[in-house]
Amino acid sequence: MKAVSFLRECRAELEKVQWPSREEVVNSTIVVLVTVIIFSLFLFFSDMLFVEVLTYLWKLMG
């Protein structure tokens, strides 16, 4: 009967959890999406700049 005891304890612990409200979830999701978009754009433009610099240097050497 360890499984039954385990499930009861799990349920008791889950009742102690303070779940976020819908508004908190939506706000957190928006923050995450905006952050991901900003970092993605930063990495995209950094990569483009890096490629251009390397291409320029290769043309100078060759």
Image (cartoon, helix red, strand yellow):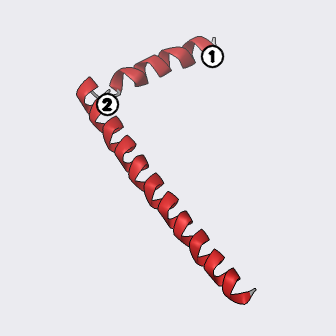
* Image quarter of residue 33: top left
Residue designated by label 1: 2
As drawn, the residue found furthest toward the bottom would be: 61
Residue at the location (42% across, 25% down)? 13
Residue at the location (41% across, 23% down)? 14
Q: Residue 47 appears at what percent x and percent y?
A: 56, 64
Residue 25 is labelled as 2
Q: Nearer the viewer, residue 30 or 60?
A: 60
Q: Which circle, 1 or 2, is nearer the viewer? A: 2
Q: Nearer the viewer, residue 4 or 26?
A: 26
Image vertical order of residue 34 relative to residue 44, above or below: above
**In which quadrant will I find the C terminus?**
bottom right
- Is residue 7 toward the left or the right of residue 20 in the image? right
Which amino acid type is shown beneath numbered disc 1? Lys
Q: Dot 1 lies on which element?
A: helix
Image vertical order of residue 59 relative to residue 46, above or below: below
Among the two numbered marks 1 and 2 on one chain, the one whose residue lies closer to the N terminus: 1
Q: Residue 40 appears at what percent x and percent y?
A: 47, 53
Image vertical order of residue 53 relative to residue 46, above or below: below
